[in-house]
Image (spheres, rainbow, N blue to C red):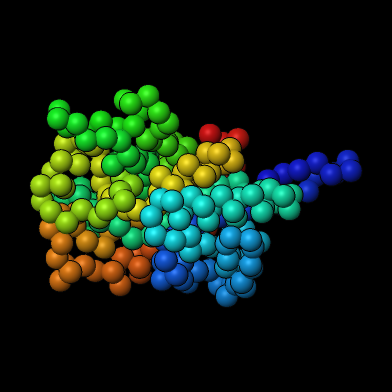
Amino acid sequence: MVVQAEEGRLTTSPVRVLVATAVPAERDAVARAFPDPGREVRLPGAVLHRTGEAYDLLAAGVGPASAAASVSAALTAAALAGTPYALVVSAGIAGGFAPGAPVGSLVVADEITAADLGAETPDGFLPVTELGFGAVTHRPPAALVRQVTDATGARPGTVLTVSTVTGTAERAAALRARHPGALAEAMEGFGVAEAAAAHGTPVLEIRAVSNPVGPRDRTAWRIGDALAALTAAFGKLGPVLESWHPYDQ
């Protein structure tokens, strides 16, 4: 809760959290963690699933561009309405790097990194920052990452954002060589983080691992198990997210 002064007295208001997933199946997995069935709220450029006073859930689309556009629309609408979000959470399933993030485990990002934003050169890959542009990493609030880790048992580490899902052992090895702290890869976190940063809103990313990063083997995917793990995680996250405030950073 946020404590506010109003006409000489103290009042409380809920911390509002925007949870952005890629697809409706992930959004619905998060929604199952809450007793309130919620309602649909249509905005220009985004459709929210609002549950209770604290949470708006958004299926923002696949990939960093769609995620950034949808999240930015939701953040802008909330700001214009005078009800800004205190936190944006990028959530969903992901590929996990063995052995640190086995299938079924949870990962919370201490760094959200765009893994393939840059240029290929004869000497290897150069991130866009080495070309003199932009950013490739966002860091969620460290105190919040610790609280989420304690509450859910999630493993903290780098979550990579990729525009192309890894499908070979060679690419998996290359990503790990460039990002030795990486535990998982997904497709939206950096886009969500870019939109949140543009609005001055802190960001968090939490992922449930559905498959190993590496050769594309659909028989090894455990999407149902990962979605169930995502539901369980948000069932434990409520007290953490609802009591957290940006001033706690």
Q: Quadrant of residue 134?
A: top left
| Residue 212, percent from left and from top | 19, 57
Residue extending farthest to the left is 170
**Residue 188 visible, this orientation:** yes
Q: Decide if residue 177 is on the left or right side of residue 195.
A: left
Residue extending farthest to the bottom is 37
248 and 116: which is toward the camera: 116
Q: Residue at x 66, y 54 (%)?
A: 77
State how many labels appear. Answer: 0
| Residue 28, percent from left and from top | 46, 71
In this rendering, the answer to whether 12 lies above or below 199 is: below
Residue extending farthest to the right is 7
In this rendering, the answer to whether 26 lies above or below 197 is: below
Q: Residue at x 58, y 66 (%)?
A: 47
Q: Residue at x 45, y 39 (%)?
A: 140
**Residue 15 visible, this orientation:** no
Q: Decide if residue 175 is on the left or right side of residue 189.
A: left
